[in-house]
Amino acid sequence: MPAVPHPPAFDRDERRIIHFTGFAHAATHYVELVYPTLAVGLALETGRPVEQVLSWSFVGYLLFGLGALPAGIAADRFGARKVILGGLLVAGLSACFAGGAEPGWPIVLCLAGLGAGASLYHPAGTGLLSRAVAARGRALGLNGIYGNAGIALSPLLTGLLVEHVGWRLTFVLTGGVLIAATLALSRVQIVEHPVVRRAADDEVGAAPPARAIAVFGVLCLTATLGGFAYRGNTVAQPALFAEQIHFMGYGAAASLAMLVGIAGQYLGGIIADSRELRASYLCFHLASLPMLVLIALTTSWPLLFVSSLYVFFALGMQPIENSLFATLTPERWRSTAYGLKFVLTFGIGSTAVWMVRGVAASFDWSAVYWVLAGVSLALISSIGLLFGLTRRRPVRNREEPARA
């Protein structure tokens, strides 16, 4: 498969955008994943089943998805920077309030605010990168690395904080740091001008409207299934590790597994700029499927190893998936399209919380991953539909470095 020409180096404005969105992405994912780890300590303190305590996060994760569409519309209209900063501030305040809340519905309401605030980043940040950086795939890959750093650090630091200062102060410290980060990022000025792209390479303009809508629908289907698998793994993994891994802390084990995703994100970004996007997307998902099966069958060191490989492929595909959305949607509605994607990815994906609770209570934590393997198989089948609808020519990232 021939590679496209190597994209240009990032200029100063692009580097500033990449770091601004990157720090915001890391903060968003860090605060998003505090609760699954914190919930283990909260359950021990209150004497409630961990499955019940985890289910309190459902409303927050639902809003984490549902807030993405209005966030995308706002970013297209008012600019991504304002939307990103507003979301981080709301999330930080909500985390602080959670530190003083009582277990039960008060915690649910605080997590709802946290999820609503965190929901604003993804459509705004991803839309900004896809419009304003010429080397789109590499930029999305680097953004994913920042986000994965937040994902990886969250279980480790949260586990340590809960152990030493308790779950209440863990919430307060997390919110305080997020508010401080928001104030620091507010001093960064960025240019949101779009890159000029060659019209001949516009996949949207080349497709009839009905087919373009069908393609977008299938993309949303694949993203939704991927979001369900992602949420199921992030919710179940700390509890599974606490049960099956005893040679290190479950928080540290979860962080170690997530750190491997950084390499996957980097590779996915390079592949997104150099290879056919649909085939690359399919290959990453094909590789992740057997890892889910092996997670259900292993314990101890083998469990940590295959969990890390799953994260490598499951997160490594994200720059490719986001590039597909960018290539197959109009630029003027880019953040709105990402907003709809993340509504489905994180919104419907939030129902995985209930799947995890039901399956773990009825069977065990390993059984959760048999369900996720079935979801992954359905996802792979839906990529076949994408090939059928876009069969006329390869789908690639193509950029022109000149600016509007």
Image (cartoon, rainbow, N blue to C red):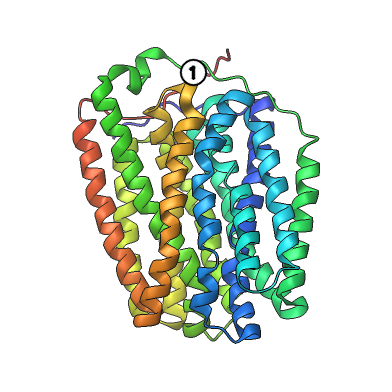
Q: Does residue 45 appear in the picture of this structure?
A: yes
In the image, residue 132 sits, relative to residue 314, either above or below, namely above
> Taking 22 as reference, is 292 left or right?
left
- Residue 402 is situated, as x and y percent measured from the top left of the image, at 55, 14
Q: Residue at x 42, y 24 (%)?
A: 398
Determine which quarter of the picture holds residue 388. top left
Q: Secondary structure at mark 1?
A: loop
Q: Residue at x 47, y 74 (%)?
A: 304
Q: Amino acid at mark 1?
A: Glu
Q: Residue at x 31, y 31 (%)?
A: 2
> Taking 280 as reference, is 385 left or right?
left
Q: Residue at x 59, y 78 (%)?
A: 40
Determine which quarter of the picture holds residue 210. top left
Q: Count the marks.
A: 1
- Residue 287 is situated, as x and y percent measured from the top left of the image, at 32, 57
- Residue 151 is situated, as x and y percent measured from the top left of the image, at 58, 58
| Nearer the observer, 220 or 395 | 220
Image quadrant where one finds the N terminus: top left
| Nearer the observer, 86 or 8 | 86
Q: Does residue 313 appear in the picture of this structure?
A: no
> Taking 235 as reference, is 96 left or right?
right
| Nearer the observer, 250 or 76 | 76
> Taking 26 as reference, is 361 left or right?
left
In the image, residue 145 sits, relative to residue 10, either above or below, namely below
For disc 1, the marked residue is 400
In the displayed image of the protein, which residue is found farthest to the front?
105
Image quadrant where one finds the C terminus: top right
Q: Residues within 10 Å of mark 1 (few under 14, many from 20)?
A: some
